Image (cartoon, rainbow, N blue to C red):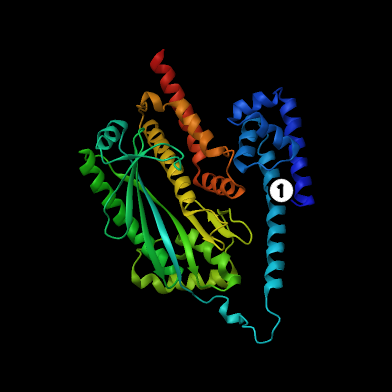
Amino acid sequence: MATDAVAEARKTLGRKLRGLREASGYTQQELAHLLGYSRPRVAGAERGESCSALFWQGCDKLLKTGGMLASGHEEVEGIRRTEAREAAEAERIRRVPLSSSAPQVTEDKAGELAGFVARSHKFIAAFIGSSSAEQVTSSGEFQGSGPSQWISCQSIPFAHSSGQCDLHIWPFGVAIFHLVEDLTLPNIASLALWRMRSYSENMAWATANLRQLTGHEDVSASYVLSAYWVTDPEWPEENLDDALRTICTPRILLQREAQFLESEREQAEQAERRILTNGHDGSGIEPFGLSGVSIGHASWSGVVYHPFSPDQALAESDLVACELATQSMWAYCEYINRQVESGLDPDLPEPHGWRFLRGAKSRLVNPRPQETGQHRAMRDAIVKTSGLLEHLDQAIDIARQSQSQGTS
């Protein structure tokens, strides 16, 4: 529940939106239609209800405010985060046993390395084309996605030596291997080295298998994104959030020209100690946890989530479904934009042109009627840090122009 300070700041932001909307001559319905949201969403924002950063960025772009509304939203979120941190610290102090026999964390433990247990979710993405997607999924072994998937696809289990793997294929031509690996590591530096070494192996493995499946030698995996579901962290409480932020951005432990060799482990561990001692500055990271229930962070590099209370926190499948939808659209938009950069008009299958892209944007941006605040925060954080919204807007414009030229 919002505090008085947060509620008043949101109302002030809502009044600014209303003034700008009216000055631009839009009704709430017209603005909502142009943004791809519902009218109640715009009305709620003007009343002071909470809306995502993506909503305010869209308003800024449409109303040509120079980023004023998004900046106002960041100020509101800054107030909310500060109050949440203060409340969490007060709760932590309240829970500390008063007995002198209670274990105390000594100062030199602040930067101490610690191990953790997690499940690594890798999303290895490629664009194979709509005709290849249809050809590969024509096998009776593929199963249609259930209601948990945000954007419909076909899936099949796929053998992998290091973990459980499924291949997901979307009719617009994107294929994603979802590889789940159980990890028990002594520190985050070990994760950083393993992650970067395994990425090249994963890309080569995915490329070889997709070429065999499609019969096309020009098909290649384009990137890997990781999400980590941390189950058993060993850091002291005061280091936990910084440690999880570092898991979300493990590349910062490695030197710019790193070759990901074992000889680089000592330097990575020293970098890890510095962060655990001095704190992670949080650059490029969006939090989406719920105080007392979970810690979650999203960044360009990936996602980390640690549930304190599994029965109240997000389900692991929620995070996976969000990432599958986000990465499937990211890979599709990447293909469209890459075609344009090569001087070509993208060849888009008729059912998956600009209207489909617009619908996918709505599905990724707008909350569902039955979803919780935790789901909403997760989606907003993942979509924002992925850069997908800008990717989608550009792809929609390209697809609309391409299709209009084709019918003229």
Q: Is residue 185 above or below residue 408?
A: below
What amino acid is found at the position of numbered circle 1 in the picture? Val
Residue matched to label 1 = 76
Q: Quadrant of the C terminus?
A: top left
Which quadrant of the figure has residue 188?
bottom left
Measured from the top left, where is residue 51 in percent x and y?
65, 41
* Pick the front one: 184 or 101: 101
Residue 382, x across and y down, in percent: 52, 48
Give percent across and percent down for residue 257: 39, 61
With respect to residue 246, does 204 lie above or below?
Answer: above
Q: Hey, which residue is sitting farthest top in the picture?
A: 408
| Left or right position of 304 against 169 | right
- Is residue 328 visible to the viewer in this orientation of the structure? yes
Q: Please report the residue visible at 41 percent of the width from the left and 34 percent of the height from the top.
A: 337
Task: Judge from the rendering whether residue 1 lies leftward or rightward of residue 372; answer left or right.
Answer: right
The residue drawn where x is 54% and y is 45% is 379
Residue 252 visible in the shown view: no
Relative to 270, 19 lies left or right: right
The one nearer the camera, 98 or 301, is: 98
Where residue 334 sits, quadrant-wise, is top left
